[in-house]
Image (tube, grey):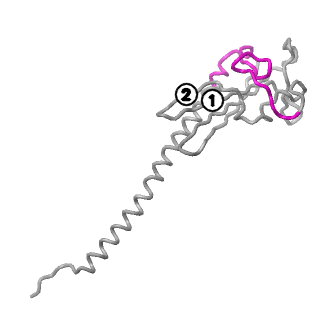
Amino acid sequence: MGIKGVSLVELLVATVIVVVVMSSMSLFFPKASKAAFMSRYIATGKNLATGKIQEIKQDPYALVPLTYAGAPSPYTHSFTYPGNPNGPNGCDCSLENPDSYPVLDQLTDNGVTFTRRLCINLVYRNGSNWSSYCPASDGSNDTGLKNIRVRVSWAAGTSAQSIDAESMVNR
């Protein structure tokens, strides 16, 4: 009767298997953790964007401010796309880069700063399309529809992220 034991080769093979499995798992956990944080940031961004739209839509139509060059702060914005900013398409938020919309506010959650940008313009139905237009100085050309666009952006690590939301408010 001999004494049964584990040979050195069996011990080394078992050790290598354990090291490979643990290394694989250690690579997975940071990615899973990053994905969980990104999901949280995306949910927060969506909530901030849709929350702002709902907040604006609760106001009476006349109190929903427009975004254009002559608007009061923080809604003042000079549109930068080619053409006359006071022309028939000179107040179209959809033609503008959302990152250039006026900053409405900044909120911090667990060390991450979320920036909300807002652009509101007048729109009318042009056949099957929506068209934007600038307000008359006396407001006489208001058709009763305003388009609301919100962009929420934040930096997570080395990457910049953003969420866009859009809705309309009517008289």
Question: Residue at the location (79% across, 26% down)?
Answer: 78
The residue lying toward the viewer, choosing from 169 and 8, is 8
- Asked if residue 69 lies left or right of residue 167, the reply is right
Please state the extent of the stretch shown in magenta in the rendering: 54-82
Label whose residue precedes the other's in the sequence (2 or 1): 2
- Asked if residue 37 lies left or right of residue 20, the reply is right
Q: Quadrant of the N terminus?
A: bottom left
The residue lying toward the viewer, choosing from 155 and 130, is 155
Whether residue 65 appears in magenta in the rendering, the answer is yes
Q: CA distance from mark 2 to mark 1?
A: 8 Å
Q: Quadrant of the C terminus?
A: top right
SS label for mark 1: strand
Compared with 56, 152 (above or below) is below
- Asked if residue 140 lies left or right of residue 101, the reply is right
Whether residue 98 appears in magenta in the rendering, the answer is no
Q: Which mark is residue 107?
A: 2
Q: Residue furthest top?
A: 138
Question: Residue at the location (80% across, 29% down)?
Answer: 79
SS label for mark 2: strand
Amino acid type, mark 2:
Leu
Question: Residue at the location (60% across, 27% down)?
Answer: 51
Q: Which residue is mark 1?
A: 116
Q: Residue furthest front?
A: 158
Kindly indicate the quadrant of the structure image that contains residue 70.
Answer: top right
- Whether pointer 2 and pointer 1 mark residues with C-beta atoms closer than 8 Å, the reply is yes
Magenta segment main secondary structure: loop
Q: Position of residue 46 (x, y in %)?
A: 59, 35
Q: Residues within 10 Å of mark 1 (few under 14, many from 20)?
A: many
Question: Residue at the location (69% across, 27% down)?
Answer: 118
